Amino acid sequence: MASHIVGYPRMGPKRELKFALESFWDGKSSSDDLQKVAADLRVSIWKQMADAGIKYIPSNTFSYYDQVLDTTAMLGAVPLRYGWNGGEIGFDVYFSMARGNATVPAMEMTKWFDTN
């Protein structure tokens, strides 16, 4: 029987992504370090799904922060206040949209159905 799942936890079994993000945000690691942790996690997750017999491996289950933010970035729907002038949306703009910074607030987060 063929199997499929809709998504998969992305933080890692020992919360590797969480710690890599915090290190990056604190300026203790580089964007290359963060991307390496993320790439290693994605490979590990894909392998776990394949080893579990999942025939149809889902796409777009990984996010550095939030899938809705990812969609906003993919569509280029970046509010003017974040200073994006087209082209690739780097971590500076992406995480400013997510978390804000000293000069601009984060984008609004909407909770649906009283959930987190």
Image (cartoon, rainbow, N blue to C red):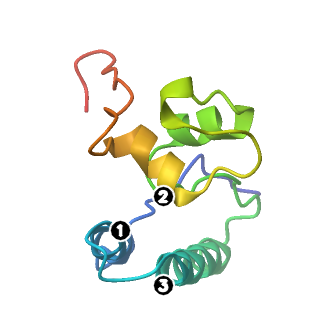
Does residue 37 appear to the left or right of 46 in the view shown? Answer: left
Which one is nearer the viewer's eye here, 54 or 66?
66
At 69% across and 39% down in the image, what residue appears?
85
Tag 3: Cα neighbours inside 10 Å, few (<14), some, or many (≥20)?
A: some
Residue 80 in the image, given as x and y percentages of width and height: 56, 25
Does residue 88 appear to the left or right of 100 in the view shown? Answer: right
Instruction: Give me the C-alpha separation between circle 2 and circle 3.
Output: 13 Å
What amino acid is labelled 2 in the image?
Tyr
Q: Are marks 1 and 2 in contact (CB under 8 Å)?
A: yes
> Which mark is on residue 21?
1
Instruction: Give me the C-alpha separation between circle 3 and circle 1.
Output: 10 Å
Residue 28 in the image, given as x and y percentages of width and height: 29, 82
Reading the image, the residue beneath label 2 is 64
Q: Which structural element holds mark 3?
A: helix
Of the residues under marks 1 and 2, which one precedes in the sequence? Answer: 1
Residue 91 in the image, given as x and y percentages of width and height: 52, 58
Of the residues under marks 3 and 1, which one precedes in the sequence? Answer: 1
Q: Quadrant of the N terminus?
A: bottom right
